[in-house]
Amino acid sequence: MRSLKLDTPKSLSQRVMQRLRQAIIDGEFALGAAISEEMVANSFGVSRTPVREAMGQLQAQGLVVIRPQVGSFVFTPSADDINALCTFRIALEPKAAELAYGHDRDGAIATMSEAIAAMEPAVTAKDNIAYGRADAAFHEALFTHCGNRYLAESYQLVSGRVAALRTNLTSPIDVRTRTSFDEHRRLLDLFARGEFTAFEELMTTHITNSGVVYARALKVDALKVE
């Protein structure tokens, strides 16, 4: 039998990947920004090898675009990407909610309640990073507690991009108003009562409005470039 000894460089690349992933989600690297392998390697005190491996993992998650002979960049969504992403979420999240209600209602309610509890001080402090993290935790709770790993894995394919768009584009608006916060509280209430027709309607509106903000931001950025 071949040795199953863990390969240290892979473990290191995983840690680099996780730190870079969070940096992209938190907006430390703006959408479309270049990520220098040399800068990252020097910052982490590692060689370029684990950084290169981490970039490959982030590319598989859709967070990084690697252009051979040019460099690595944080993803920038197109209008079609945003539309497809919102359609994907609208299809999955209400179903995940129904399954979570049947599989682990109390656990889902506890996790979503914790997320909402974290949102309120973030709104008060106008901390869009803290709000974005709490927002992400709320939506991910539906998949964490749904009891269907295939559904959960499907969401993981887009969760990083959703979180990055949320922090960079919608959270700065959400912390200036209470609209998103109030919608999350209503979603939790509808979930707790098992009112999934109303839940799906509100979730569809909630996700659609996020897509509108994303699309508007893209147009603004395009005008800046021109």
Image (cartoon, rainbow, N blue to C red):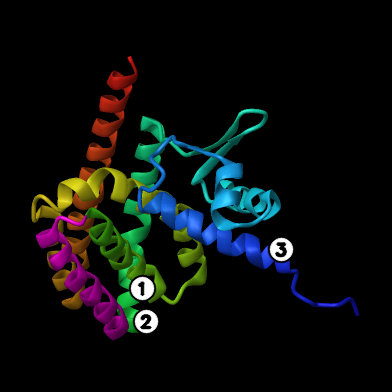
Magenta span of residues: 105-127
Identify the residue shown where x is 42% and y is 49%: 24
Q: Quadrant where the N terminus lies? A: bottom right
- Which secondary structure class fits the magenta region best? helix
Give the Cα distance between marks 3 and 1: 39 Å
The image shows residue 13 at horizontal and vertical percentages of 63, 60
Q: Amino acid at mark 1?
A: Leu
Task: Mark 3 and mark 1 in contact? Answer it, CB < 8 Å.
Answer: no
47 on left or right of 181: right
Please tell me in which quadrant of the rendered image residue 120 appears. bottom left
Q: Amino acid at mark 3?
A: Pro
Q: Nearest the camera: 4 or 72?
A: 72
| Disc 1: CA contacts within 10 A as few (<14), some (14-19) or many (>=20) | some
Task: Mark 2 and mark 1 in contact? Answer it, CB < 8 Å.
Answer: yes
The numbered disc on residue 9 is 3
- The mark tally for this picture is 3
Identify the residue shown where x is 32% and y is 67%: 137
The image shows residue 125 at horizontal and vertical percentages of 13, 60
- Find numbered disc 2 in the image and state the secondary structure of the residue it sits on: helix
Identify the residue shown where x is 74% and y is 74%: 6
Determine which residue is flagged by label 2: 103
- Find numbered disc 3 in the image and state the secondary structure of the residue it sits on: helix
In reply to whether residue 32 is colored magenta, the answer given is no
The image shows residue 103 at horizontal and vertical percentages of 37, 81
Give the Cα distance between marks 2 and 1: 6 Å
Q: Amino acid at mark 2?
A: His
